[in-house]
Amino acid sequence: MSADITAPAEVAVMAPELTRTARQARRRRIRPATVLTPLGSLGAAIGVWYAASYLLLSPDRRFLVPPPQQVLTVSFLDWTHLHPMLQALWLTAQVALVGLLIASVLGVTAAVLMSRARWLERSLYPYAVVLQTVPILAIVPLIGLWFGFGFTSRVVVCVLIALFPMIANTLFGIQSVDRAHHDLFTLQRAGRWARLRKLELPAALPSVFTGLRTSSGLSVIGAIVGDMFFKQGEPGIGTLLDVYRSRLQSEDLFAAIILASLFGVAVFAVFTLVARLAVGSWHASADRP
């Protein structure tokens, strides 16, 4: 009789360890696929690039889509071409990171305030939607008139583009807390701010980081758009893109596009890693490789 009672308890104790072992084994099994799949897609993209250069375009029009080795030798391996791109990318990175920081703080703060009062949500959320739907290019001239045509205006563009995902995802995470957890805090007579600090915000972390990853990519796009339209001061990578396009410097244009894309991927990867470290293994998203 005692064996029948203790056996389920032993299984319950062993279950988390078995689950963790199975999860680690599954990650080991699919790790080659996680490496080979991106490499395969990269090879396919380079193959399409070669096909577009040599098969779709005639030799006199090949300058429109130069082959990869030409971009490598002319732009990436020539320091006189690469150096201004790296300088411009550094400025764009500063704009994107400052804009992302401001958008994150404003977005989380606005979502917390809206979660505290329904009337605030009804009052503020429509304006957040408007920020997402209004074409940013339509208000770029106004931003320039209000904030000048330098660094500040570029940051404002980043904030406007990156703000909505932070608001929407944070608010969704706070409002999606399990009702049973709320009942437990009610039984303990927890106040609203204690409930927010100890329950809602920790439970909303996966959603917050989802918004952060989305906003990080949008912030890079906003920085490049701001570079193209606000050209006072040092040029950003978007400014160089516009210059290379107007001068038909195709190799440099493709190189600048690749650098900007790699920067966006790097920012997304960094925040994905931070999300995994912050959320840990307790959320279902940790089961993904």
Image (tube, rainbow, N blue to C red):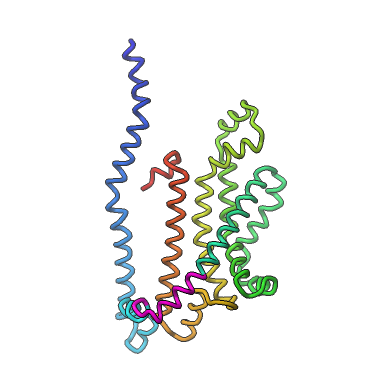
Provide residue 98's location: percent of width, then percent of height: 56, 62
Against 174, residue 237 (above or below) is below
Left or right of residue 280, residue 7 in this image: left
Residue at 29% from the left image edge and 41% from the top image edge:
25
Please say whether residue 51 is visible from this viewpoint: no
Q: Is residue 241 within the magenta segment?
A: no
**Residue nearest the viewer, comparing 262 with 68:** 262
Left or right of residue 107, residue 247 in this image: left
Please tell me whether the stretch drawn in magenta is mainly helix, strand or loop.
Answer: helix
Q: Quadrant of the N terminus?
A: top left
Residue at 27% from the left image edge and 46% from the top image edge:
29
Boundaries of the magenta span: 76-91
Provide residue 190's location: percent of width, then percent of height: 64, 31
Against 44, residue 10 (above or below) is above
Residue that sits furthest to the top in the current view: 1
Against 214, residue 72 (above or below) is below
Residue at 69% from the left image edge and 74% from the top image edge:
145
Provide residue 53's location: percent of width, then percent of height: 33, 79
Q: Hey, which quadrant is residue 160 in on the image?
A: bottom right
